[in-house]
Structure formats: C-alpha cells, structure tokens
Amino acid sequence: MKSYEEQRVPSAPAPSFREQGDVPAMSVTVRVPAKVNVQLTVGGARPDGFHELANVFLAVDLFDEITVSSAEELRITCSGRDAAEVPLDHTNLAARAARVLAERHGLTSNVHVHIAKDIPVTGGMAGGSADGAGALVACDALWGTQASRRQLLDICAELGSDVSFSLVGGAALGIGRGERLTELEVGGRFHWVFAMAGRGLSTPAVFKEFDRLNEGVRIPEPVASQDLLDALAKGDAKALAAAVCNDLQPAALSLFPELARTLAAGKAAGALAGLVSGSGPTIAFLARDAADAKEIAEALSASGTCRSVRTAVSPAVGAVVL
Ligand code: ATP
C-alpha cells in the first residue's frame, strides 16, 4: 500500500493549456467514476457529528463527464436521466469545487460547468462527489492553475468525504471520515450488477438511523478486514463476496424495507454477494464474470424490484481529462 501523498499526479495528468503551446483551452472535459464500498465499517459518532470509518472504495466504470468552459458567471447545467434531481445552484459540489479552486488562486470562478450525468443521483455511488472532483480537475486544466496533487486532495477533503476517492479512483482504504486514503492493490477485474431504486436515500438520514439503531451499543473502532484486502489483491471474486460488509445496510433497509426484495432477487439470480452500496439505496451484486453479470442483470430487470439495472466493471481509473 502506498500513500497518495507520495505520488505526483492524478491517474491521468491533466494537460494544462501551457503544455498545449500557451493557447488557452476553450473547454475541458473530465470523466469521473462512480464507486462501490466493498467494506463500510462505521465507528461511533465523533464530537463533530461525523463517524470514524474504515471504508474500502472500489471505482466502477459508470461515469459522469464534466465539461467546463469560460462564461460570464458561474453556471451549472446538467443532462441525463436523473438531471432534474441535481441542484443547479451554489450547493452543487461542482460549483463549490470551482469556487474553492478559484479562491485559492485569486481568480474569479466565471465558468460554465456542464454535467453529463450517468451516475445515479442519491444512489450511494458518490455521484455528487464525482462531479466535485471532475470540476476541480477540469477547472485546473482550463485555468492553467497547475495545482499540485496535494492541493487538489486538500480541496477534495474540504468538499466532502468521498471526493478524494473520486479523484484517485482504483481501489483505496479510506479512514477518518473516509477521506484519508491509502491506495490498495487489485489483482483482477470484478464484475458488478447495480440495481437502482425508484427513490433516493439521504446519506445523513441513513447515518442518523444507524445512530438510532445502535443507541447504547458500544461500537468498536473500525478497522479494514484483512480477508477483504487479500481478496482484492488476489482478484478473487468468491473470497471478496465472503468478505464484503456494510454497517449502514441495516439502517438503509430500515428506512427503505423494499430493498430486501431487490437483495433477494439478485441472490436468487446467482449473485455471489449483494449489498447496499454506501448509504444506498442502490444495491450492488457481485458476479463471477461478465456472462454471469448479464444473466443477473436480466433476472433483476424482470423481477420488478428495482427502477433500472446496470452492469459495471471495477477497478476503474479516477478523474481523467478527455
Ligand atoms: P454518497 O454515495 O457520496 O453518499 P450519493 O451517491 O448517495 O452520495 P449524490 O448523488 O452524490 O448521492 O447526491 C447527494 C446529494 O448531493 C443530492 O441530494 C444533491 O442535493 C447533492 N448534490 C450536490 N451536487 C451534486 C451533483 N453534482 N450531483 C448530484 N447531487 C449533488
């Protein structure tokens, strides 16, 4: 395992306009992946209200694309199936990312950010975080600010717990609120089926329910599962299936009991494992291979227990300038 601080650049270097011969880029597009948490172990609530986590992230090849171009003022637009659910005001993580980067470099954040959204919204797959990381890398390239990896990761941690991982992609262990990352080795490809639900679940609401369900319970300090890290390193889907865990799953199921039917349908269709992705309500099923994933996806679609179904492969790379 190596620390991201020791590495020089994100997964793909952002070509700044200086490298393109001092001609300012008109627009920059960055692709950013969704994530699934193969381990989400939750510790007790801290005085600041956040929980200590041992969080194993795996990036999957469902992507949002963020395109930035110069504009009169900061403006966000969004396209895609879930576009209507995405806030287009200053609360959008992409807008916040642009603003923070501009402030750090004494610039104005006059930029049009377009989000081509393919990651489900409020699905527990870090779609908003992906857009924050994508906008950060895109604005850095557009403005030629050439922020170091350290500076980009600092801004990511300020924006939210999952934003740093969206930037780096691959697989990582996140501790603290999940934002202190260590890269993990992955020895093969994992095939996933994601079942999207008809409505979202708010992450704070799920943590609140976790607190309610665990009232009076002494919660041990969260640690990464060695069996799970070994399974990832070996690329062993069966071993990974035996080790996946999500402490938020009971809380998500308590708030959204219908998810139990989706879990049962995927398991009946032959999934090696099924678990709530992050705070849910998307359910992630691990398949043996691509053919198995296709079969499980078809069975889930026919089951009527979810809104839509997608297959995906992990690990996927982090934010990449296209
Ligand atoms: P996570 O897995 O990180 O907990 P999530 O996948 O469950 O997040 P998101 O799609 O990231 O959920 O959305 C969470 C909330 O963030 C939404 O309710 C929305 O109001 C807000 N939000 C801010 N920026 C964005 C964005 N660019 N895309 C989607 N939601 C955003």
Image (tube, grey):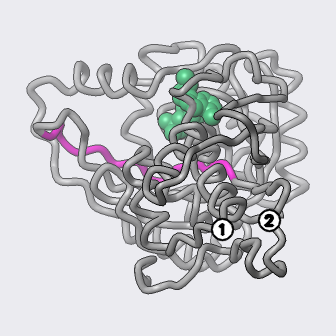
**Magenta region, residue range:** 33-46
Nearer to the camera, 112 or 236: 112
Residue beneath the point at 57% across and 31% down: 92
Residue beneath the point at 65% across and 41% down: 110
Image quadrant in which the N terminus is located:
bottom left
Which residue lies under the disc numbered 1?
144
Residue beneath the point at 44% across and 67% down: 151
Which residue lies under the disc numbered 2?
24
Figure quadrant, ligand 1: top right
| Left or right placement of residue 170 versus residue 226 in this view | right
Nearer to the camera, 207 or 232: 207
Is 44 included in the stretch rendered in magenta? yes
Q: Is mark 2 within 8 Å of ligand 1?
A: no
Nearer to the camera, 207 or 82: 82
Residue 46's label in the rendered image is none
Confirm or deny contact between disc 2 and disc 1 (CB under 8 A). Answer: yes
Q: Amino acid at mark 2?
A: Pro
Residue 86 in view in this figure: yes
**Pointer 2 or 1: first along the chain:** 2
Residue 135 position in % (x across, y down): 64, 49
| Left or right placement of residue 201 versus residue 111 in this view | left
Residue 106 position in % (x across, y down): 47, 55
Residue 124 position in % (x across, y down): 56, 35
Q: Secondary structure at mark 1?
A: loop
Nearer to the camera, 186 or 175: 175
- Name above or below for residue 76 compared with residue 159: above
Q: Amino acid at mark 1?
A: Gly
Is 294 included in the stretch rendered in magenta? no
> Label 2: few (<14), some or many (≥20) within 10 Å?
some
